[in-house]
Image (cartoon, helix red, strand yellow):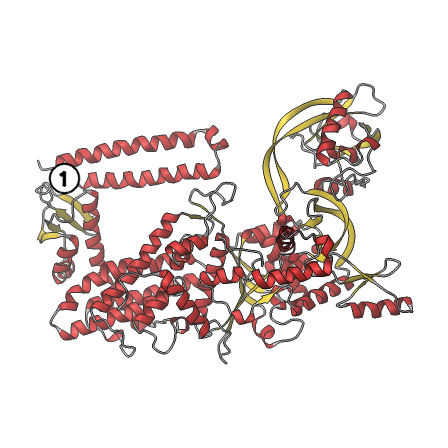
């Protein structure tokens, strides 16, 4: 017998160990089965399960469990990413606690320490995914720095270099002065902060007392200015275009140029151009062939390219000194408060500096062309489709991809330098030396490039490197291209686009057929979760308190297309109640001797109510399958929820209680078998969403004596499982009872109060249904008696149901006049609330200044108030007072 209550802590660990022991997740090789493959986005080896992980891995697991049950040869490829910068920081901090400095250790010894840390602590995230119920083939777990994957990285790098798609160049990069490395755009966090905008007067050359005023938020970079730009249509500056102005302090003549980058509405309309320290200015500089002057060193201190008194100053100290100097010169026009976004390194927390440096780049523009074409042809589809537009916008404006990092942990760039600086790129040092010896005509020592590759470079090869490439493995042939990538929209450019470019270049095919892009998980108010706001929800704590199934189902049910998931603990508590409902329904079946018989054929049922529930099971399965396959996970979850809680528990089990205790042995036995059959199908349909509780109930109810539920077949139903007559009749009955219940609720009539009803306008078919199910209607609607009438009696509550009018004779149970007064007062109160919401939403100042989540919250409250008002008005309209 099932325990009185479901205890996730007691069940989940045991169930998961059972799955792993039985190799339920392993790759199968059924001869005639189609392959189905998902590549797990490899979480950082330093990572800990957060709510974004919980969502994306739940979605993947639903798909994997569903297609596994469909009989496909399923591969969910797991693994972790070496996370270059993040991991190096973690290990450095661990060593610092022991008084050990990375530099003192040296590169080789430091890397040994990183590998030791990885072996001891780097698998935490994978164990946390197990707690989430994830079911990948763990035996195939890969790491982005595995030997085979490292070979793939070197081979692709060498190939791209020889095709001139990888090159070394001096360009602007995001430079982290604390970590001393270039970082990717994804590792840059834009933080909003209050600052200032200063207006400086630059003297116009050869025009006494004539100035052009430039506005800047970064005075410290002015020493590297090589132009001032104005908009070509800005009439204020038309006469100055083509002339020169004098750069204060430096006393360098710089041109005044016309460029549409200058915004006439922003600042003074004239903008200083510093190509060496601003990405936009760099583009302007290239368009106008401007000189690029680098005024910072790697520590963001001013170098020898500035006047001597500023050399060696940190950038913020330099800002103070420049402002003092400009003011002394009488060239400070004004300063203003300015709210702006400032780039910070997400790991170091310091302000990132655009800095000119020698780095390795990928010609992303050239590689992007085939990727754009593949999406336009439909070789790869985005779901929802609107993300294609975002993809194209990014790809059409793609910049060279900086792939080198100045750290030690990662794939060291496979490039070696000869004594004259000549570069030799090869898959390994032996091949590089052979090429060098051939070039120099003698044995020549080489020095390897000290940089490592951007983590995104190796992870861009993930879809084929994990399948064994460059070897032509059976898995590569069978599972590439993969079926779908599940990811958040924030890495479409950083990871999805790069995998697509690399997959097309190396494999000549996109790495996946579809990309399902899901929304972000936010707090219940719609705000992005962050430690600073204190609104981060820890999925592991939720699992501990409410169980994994409740968390998974909540995330799935809230995953509506085009909307972020607004997560609240109360919703998770609500879906834990759903788990409890399922458990209690199963106990009910056990207590009523509903034993499962695999040979039972529900199509042979004689009782209408049993034929109805068989029809509903088949109909629900079709919906759920369709929704899963079209990535409408919230629809799938909400449909199975409604079926289990409403159709099965609230209606069918209530309808069948009498049959379960009747002396009619055939009807009783048929109902017991049907209930057990339905419960078995519920476990199958729910399993992808709630794997633990369904597996446990199936085991306890002996549904799968030979194997685990996870290895069962997905239920399939042909037309012989559909009974249209019974469907129409019982659904009519359900709606009739629901209508009466709703009216009782609106009028606040207690359940223990019964009253008679008269039905007007009933045809013979309606009368037959009501007469057949009279006891059920009376019992479930809490009705004293039912009679058929031609006229609506006075003092009755009128409820229109289809062609019928149900007259609820409530005058003897409640004071109708007082109820009408109460409803009018409630309507008046709700109208006042609606007016307050309308007032706020008409207020332009509120709409302009309030955060979007607050505005949306007001709109939602108004919508709820309007829905409440409609119910009150409907209830008032139904009351017919006696004359």
Corner quadrant of residue 449 = bottom right
Quarter of the image containing the C terminus? top left
Q: Secondary structure at mark 1?
A: loop
Q: Where's residue 210, x and y in %?
A: 79, 21
Question: Label 1, on which residue?
Answer: 880
Q: Where's residue 743, x and y in %?
A: 19, 46
Q: For the point 21% across and 50% down, which residue is it?
A: 739
Q: Is residue 379 left or right of residue 549?
A: right
Corner quadrant of residue 266 = top right
Q: Is residue 559 visible?
A: no
Q: Given the current orientation, which residue lies at the most extreme top position? A: 209
Relative height, residue 593 to residue 187 (above, below): below
Q: Is residue 2 visible?
A: yes
Relative height, residue 374 to residue 748 (above, below): below
- Depth check, front residue: 713 or 859: 713
Quarter of the image containing the N terminus? bottom left
Q: Where's residue 564, x and y in %?
A: 47, 48
Q: For the point 28% across and 71% down, which residue is it?
A: 677
- Depth check, front residue: 10 or 487: 10
Q: Given the current orientation, which residue lies at the most extreme right position? A: 441
Q: Given the current orientation, which residue lies at the most extreme front position? A: 99
For label 1, the crowd category at 10 Å Cα-Cα, with few meaning under 14, some 14 to 19 and many 20 or more, is some
| Total marks placed | 1
Q: For the point 38% across and 76% down, which residue is it?
A: 707
């Amino acid at each position: 017998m099932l325990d009185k209550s479901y205890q996730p802590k007691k069940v989940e660990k045991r169930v998961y160990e059972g799955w792993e022991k039985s190799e339920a997740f392993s790759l199968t090789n059924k001869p005639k089965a189609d392959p189905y493959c998902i590549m797990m986005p490899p979480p950082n080896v330093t990572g800990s399960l957060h709510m974004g992980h919980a969502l994306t891995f739940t979605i993947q697991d639903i798909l994997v469990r569903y297609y596994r049950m469909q009989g496909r040869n399923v591969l969910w490829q797991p693994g972790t990413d070496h996370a270059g910068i993040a991991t190096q920081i973690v290990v450095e901090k661990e060593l610092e606690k022991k008084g050990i400095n990375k530099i003192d250790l040296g590169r080789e010894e430091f890397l040994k320490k990183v590998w030791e840390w990885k072996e001891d602590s780097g698998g935490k995230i994978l164990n946390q995914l197990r707690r989430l119920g994830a079911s990948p083939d763990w035996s195939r777990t890969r790491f982005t720095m595995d030997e085979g994957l490292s070979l793939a990285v070197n081979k692709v790098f060498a190939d791209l270099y020889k095709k001139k798609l990888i090159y070394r160049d001096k360009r602007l990069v995001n430079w982290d002065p604390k970590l001393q490395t270039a970082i990717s755009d994804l590792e840059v966090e834009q933080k909003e902060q209050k600052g200032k905008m200063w207006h400086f007067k630059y003297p116009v050359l050869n025009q006494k007392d004539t100035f052009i005023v430039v506005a800047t938020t970064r005075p410290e970079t002015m020493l590297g200015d090589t132009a001032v730009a104005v908009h070509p249509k800005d009439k204020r500056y038309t006469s100055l275009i083509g002339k020169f102005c004098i750069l204060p302090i430096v006393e360098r003549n710089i041109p005044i140029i016309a460029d549409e980058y200058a915004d006439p509405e922003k600042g003074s309309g004239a903008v200083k151009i510093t190509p060496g320290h601003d990405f936009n200015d760099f583009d302007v500089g290239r368009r106008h062939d401007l000189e690029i002057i680098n005024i910072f060193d790697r520590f963001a201190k001013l170098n020898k390219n500035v006047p001597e008194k500023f050399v060696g100053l940190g950038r913020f100290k330099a800002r103070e000194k420049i402002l003092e100097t400009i003011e002394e010169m009488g060239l400070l026009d004004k300063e203003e408060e300015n709210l702006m976004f400032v780039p910070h390194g997400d790991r170091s927390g310091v302000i990132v500096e655009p800095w000119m440096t020698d780095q390795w780049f990928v010609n992303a523009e050239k590689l992007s062309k085939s990727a754009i074409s593949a999406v336009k042809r439909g070789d790869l589809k985005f779901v929802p489709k609107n993300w294609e537009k975002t993809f194209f916008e990014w790809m059409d404006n793609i910049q060279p991809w900086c792939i080198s990092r100045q750290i030690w942990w990662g794939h060291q760039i496979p490039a070696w330098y000869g004594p004259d600086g000549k570069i030799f790129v090869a898959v390994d040092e032996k091949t590089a030396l052979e090429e060098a010896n051939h070039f120099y005509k003698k044995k020549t020592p080489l020095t390897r490039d000290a940089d490592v590759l951007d983590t995104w470079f190796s992870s861009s090869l993930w879809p084929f490197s994990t399948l064994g490439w460059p070897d032509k493995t059976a898995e590569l042939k069978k599972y590439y291209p993969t079926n779908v990538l599940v990811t958040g929209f924030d890495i479409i450019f950083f990871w999805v686009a790069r995998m697509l470019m690399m997959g097309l270049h190396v494999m000549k095919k996109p790495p996946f057929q579809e990309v399902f892009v899901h929304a972000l998980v936010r707090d219940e108010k719609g705000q992005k979760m962050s430690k600073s706001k204190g609104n981060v929800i820890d999925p592991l704590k939720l699992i501990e308190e409410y169980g994994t199934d409740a968390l998974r189902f909540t995330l799935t049910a809230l995953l509506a297309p085009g909307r972020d998931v607004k997560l609240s603990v109360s919703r998770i508590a609500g879906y834990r109640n759903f788990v409890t409902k399922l458990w209690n329904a199963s106990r009910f079946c056990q207590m009523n001797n509903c034993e499962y018989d695999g040979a039972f054929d529900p199509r042979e049922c004689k009782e209408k109510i049993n034929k109805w529930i068989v029809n509903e099971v088949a109909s629900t399965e079709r919906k759920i399958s369709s929704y899963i396959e079209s990535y409408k996970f919230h629809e799938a979850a909400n449909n199975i929820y409604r079926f289990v809680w409403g159709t099965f528990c609230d209606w069918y089990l209530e309808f069948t209680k009498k049959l379960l205790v009747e002396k009619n042995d055939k009807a009783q036995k048929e109902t017991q078998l049907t209930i057990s059959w339905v419960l078995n199908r519920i476990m199958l349909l729910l399993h992808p969403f709630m794997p633990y509780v369904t597996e446990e109930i199936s085991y306890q109810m002996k549904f799968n004596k030979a194997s685990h539920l996870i290895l069962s077949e997905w239920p399939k139903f042909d037309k012989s499982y559909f009974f249209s007559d019974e469907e129409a009749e019982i659904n009519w009955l359900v709606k009739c009872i629901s209508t009466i219940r709703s009216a009782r609720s609106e009028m606040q009539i207690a359940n223990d109060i019964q009253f008679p009803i008269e039905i007007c306008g009933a045809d013979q078919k309606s009368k037959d249904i009501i007469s057949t199910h009279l006891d059920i209607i009376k019992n479930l609607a809490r009705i004293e008696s039912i009679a058929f009438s031609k006229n609506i009696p006075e003092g009755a509550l009128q409820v229109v149901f289809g062609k019928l009018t149900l007259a609820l004779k409530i005058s003897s149970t409640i004071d109708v006049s007082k109820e009408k007064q109460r409803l009018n007062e409630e309507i008046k109160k709700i109208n006042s609330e609606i007016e307050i919401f309308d007032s706020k939403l008409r207020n332009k100042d509120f709409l302009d200044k309030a955060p979007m989540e607050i505005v949306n919250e007001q709109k939602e409250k108004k919508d709820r108030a309007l829905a409440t008002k409609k119910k009150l008005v409907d209830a008032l309209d139904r009351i017919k007072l006696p004359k």
